[in-house]
Amino acid sequence: MASATTSISSHPAALRDVKAARIGGLRQQQASVAPSAAAARGQRARAVRSLRAAEPARQPVAASAAAAAPAAPVADEAAALAAVDYEALARELEGASPLEIMDRALAMFGSEIAIAFSGAEDVALIEYAKLTGRPFRVFSLDTGRLNPETYQLFDKVEKHYGIRIEYMFPDASEVQELVRTKGLFSFYEDGHQECCRVRKVRPLRRALRGLRAWITGQRKDQSPGTRASIPLVQVDPSFEGLDGGAGSLVKWNPVANVDGKDIWTFLRTMDVPVNALHAQGYVSIGCEPCTRPVLPGQHEREGRWWWEDAKAKECGLHKGNIDKDGQAAAAAAAPRTANGNGSAGAPDIFESPAVVSLTRAGVENLLRLESRAEPWLVVLYAPWCPFCQAMEASYVELAERLAGSGGVKVARFRADGEQKPFAQAELQLQSFPTVLLFPSRTARPIKYPSEKRDVDSLLAFVNSLR
């Protein structure tokens, strides 16, 4: 495992100070602090503990004059950190800039805190850490399923900052068992949680057991359903740290209050590496099979696990964000639709005289027929799905064209909520929307294989099989 970095940014310090001052009121910390603050937050010069406890300790590196002071006993420091009221500290930092929050985190925890790195927000975190002038550590989870562009980003970040990222990998035997038992893409069929648990959550748990605190790039605007209330600093509700047990790990979220657009302004201003996939429409980037570009105006998390209901877009790394009580209360208060599918709130779509609305009984009748008078084209949809909404106009236009020429019935079937298990078992549903053609002389429906949902592509599919 590579050691922590102590190198200073390659950009001239004065230029960095000017640039940083432009973003969100950032200001470089002064070299000297009040004596009382220095006593409470002085830099510690100790051996760097590896994320893997079995590795030998590294030599300490002084980051400032404060590091030359005698270090307090580790036990005393751990007790002092455990005594901190982190809720009060979060309130104190509410108006602070990300740079100030990063400086406080590194000052308090020294070599026993690390930045979790994977995406754009995390490059910003590394830049903030560099601007503090303090030594810092970075770790990342290599799931084995990342995009090539993500691996290229890792390499660029290491070279840009002169660091070595401390990579964590899933247990090979667990991955082998999962793939041999359920295949390479089981998450499309039964949800992403099991795969994420093996490839991400358990490696993260191992990493965090070697730390007292970690730093994440979570933002409140990333996922309104799960991240809207994340604090700037908190006792981690889900994972354990170096001492073990509940409350043994602290979680810092320095950019929690920063909008995504401001993060990107900062990244462009500081001229730092970013993932090449961002230029291709990707916003939130995870593993390759579970990430895709989003449409203009869509929320960034819509590109993650798109085949699942958009209720809790978390992989498990930040599962403490999910307010189960709040979700249950919201579900109880939400009105139900007439067909009992739930997920109410979004207006219905594909409404047109040319589009037949099918009930489950109607779909079951179509499935039973071995010979039909005419082919049926059916879209399986959910009104809340942005991809369904995006294809509504083209599907209605296709229905109107086919209604004029005759020979093909065009229909819709709402397949979310209570109907989803049926659609998955009988109608090949994996994600919304799914388009099926029921040929006139073939019992089994044929699934439209492409994500091109314009009128001409859909019409070519129909004409090739009608």
Image (cartoon, rainbow, N blue to C red):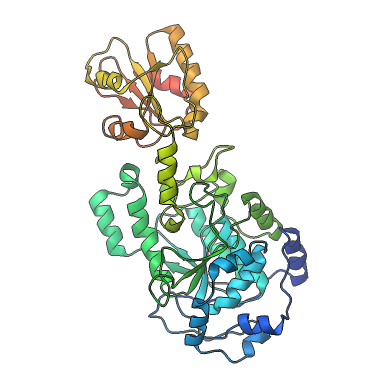
| Left or right: residue 183 compared with residue 19 | left
| Left or right: residue 181 compared with residue 288 | left
Query: What residue is shown at x 64% (from left), y 60% (from top)?
Result: 272
Could one spot residue 65 in this view of the protein? yes
Q: Position of residue 13 (x, y in %)?
A: 74, 71
Residue at the extreme bottom = 70
Q: Position of residue 425 (x, y in %)?
A: 26, 34
The total of numbered circles placed on residues is 0
Of residues 263 and 383, the one nearer the viewer is 383
Query: What residue is shown at x 40% (from left), y 39% (from top)?
Result: 332
Of residues 297 and 253, the one nearer the viewer is 253
Can you tell which quarter of the image residue 172 is in? bottom left
Q: Position of residue 276 (x, y in %)?
A: 57, 51
Image quarter where the C terminus lies is top left
Can you tell which quarter of the image residue 461 is in? top left
Image quarter where the N terminus lies is bottom left
- Vertical side of 165 occupied by 284: above or below: above
Q: Position of residue 286 (x, y in %)?
A: 47, 52
- Vertical side of 62 occupied by 207: above or below: above
| Left or right: residue 424 compared with residue 450 | left
Query: What residue is shown at x 50% (from left), y 56% (from top)?
Result: 150
Can you tell which quarter of the image residue 28 is in? bottom right
Could one spot residue 312 in this view of the protein? no
- Vertical side of 63 occupied by 156: above or below: above
| Left or right: residue 339 compared with residue 127 | left
